[in-house]
Amino acid sequence: MQDETVTPQTTDALWAHAQDRALAGVFEAREADWRNGAMVYQVLVDRFVPSADLAAKRHLYPAPKQLREWSDVPRSGRYLEDQRLWSHEIDFWGGDLASLRSKLDYVKALGADVLYLNPICLATTNHKYDALDYNTVSPEYGSRADVVQLAQAVHAQGMKLVLDGVFNHMGRQAPAFQTAMSSADSPHRDWFFIGPQYPGGARAWAQAQNLPELNLENPAVRRLLWEAPDSVVQSYLKDGVDGWRLDVAFDIGFRHLQALTDAAHAQKPGSLVVGEIWNYPNQWFPSVDGIMNFTLREIVLRLARGQLAPEAANQMIERVVQDAGIEPLLKSWLMLDNHDTPRLATALPQWPQRQLAQLLQFTLPGAPNLYYGSELGMEGGDDPEMRAPMRWDLVGDHNASLRWTRQLIKLRQQHRALRVGNHRRIDAAKLLAFERYTDRAADTVLVLVNPSASAVKDTVMVANSKLMNGTAWRNLLAPGQATPRLVAGLVDVELPPFGMLVLAPQVEPVNGYTPYKRVQ
């Protein structure tokens, strides 16, 4: 009789169905691309780690700038009419690129794949969104040589480095803008939009007079920013940087974003361009590789607060995935807070709601973007409170927020579908429920959450034809706890208030038997 033993090498080809064959290599290709499903850790350089030698740096903070104590909390200041900015924008805490390098082991140990820095270019303010010279690093932070060293150190840890590009506007004190304002014959005159119709004499982003907007229709401006081999975008990529997050990318527009992204990819194939786009994400691709997914953020936060019904949230999430497409969404950053929003612990002060929101951040399609200190439960309201210095005293196993964040990061690391899998809605009446899946049944992960303050019983339908009748589940959040069974695609679920369930199918043989004999 002919030997029909199935070897591991032939299993996939033998048992795959037509849909699987169409997906051959898709998930492997996603895994090979560092941009997909990466865990991103965001840092404000000034606020992350104090410099080892602050005394030697004090001259870099001349009045009216102030160098604060690390224990100080940022507070709103007064408007400085002569400088067209707020006094809290020139309060500093003394972090730099060298001190940041000393804590890369913490970032790596947390589970980050990408280190993202807010702007580091020469600028007047602490936030550096008012560039004076893009090609020069602000001396409070270091130099271009420090960028090269940081990139090397980040790569040695197996991570990537992404910088913040602010190409819609510069700072009012930029020499180019000053000469443009002082003379109609200045070669920089048409770099900006200048005229008496604008408050302060020039068009400024969001009417903030310290941020005059650039004329991106001017070829010289585009050459400076991204077109030329020695442009800002391309030269930093040559220095070892791996990608750019673009500030207010929605103001840059589709055409210029596409040109910038093309230039970055030509200079460094596989580099990342992520746009800060608050708009609905459909149609922004391929002008950028990914976006900062504010739409999913709003859905998650409103769901956690009880402002959005689970069924509606389920439908909205499904619509976003269908419209935007899974490939660009996997490269898009899903953040719950950052330097422009209240911190998560302030936005969701109730611990169960915060846990639920974070679970969704780490299981929905995308790249979770973790704002420094939020893993510790740091609080902070509107600007500048959310930009407080890192609380290193909160780091430790005693911190429940840190333990929970580490658990979620480990969950993603251990489950392929959560990093690069497709998304499918699970039909439910009372729960938010979805499935992350690949072409392998064993990779499947179900996520079910109850965002209400009352216990909920629900019957949900999992539309995955590979999941065998009677499948038992593994409880990924609480191993060993009892789980429901799958009956003809239906699962009866009971969850306590703000309860969460993350399940994976039990496909390994029990007592030598598994129903997953001929299903890959």
Image (cartoon, helix red, strand yellow):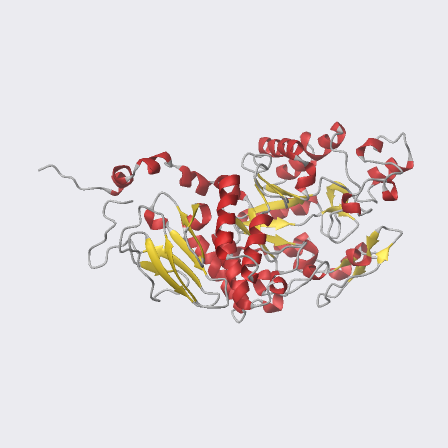
Horizontal side, residue 420 vs residue 207: left or right? left
Quarter of the picture containing the N terminus is top left
Place of residue 96 in the rendered image (x, y in percent of width and height, measured from the top left): 69, 54
Along the line of sight, the residue nearer the viewer: 313 or 429: 429
- Specify the farthest residue to the bottom: 398
Task: Estimate the x, y position of residue 231 in percent, counting from the top left.
Answer: 69, 34
Pick out the residue farthest to the right. Answer: 183
Residue 74, position as x, y percentages in the image: 74, 63
Q: Is residue 42 visible?
A: yes
* Position of residue 18 in the picture relative to residue 164 (left or right): left
Q: Nearer the viewer, residue 405 or 302?
A: 302
Q: Quadrant of the C terminus?
A: top left
Above or below: residue 348 compared with residue 295: below
Q: Residue 421 at x, y = what percent?
A: 43, 46
* Residue 51 visible: no
Q: Residue at x 87, y 40 (%)?
A: 201
Relative to 348, does residue 507 appear above or below in the rendering? above
Q: Is residue 139 left or right of residue 351?
A: right
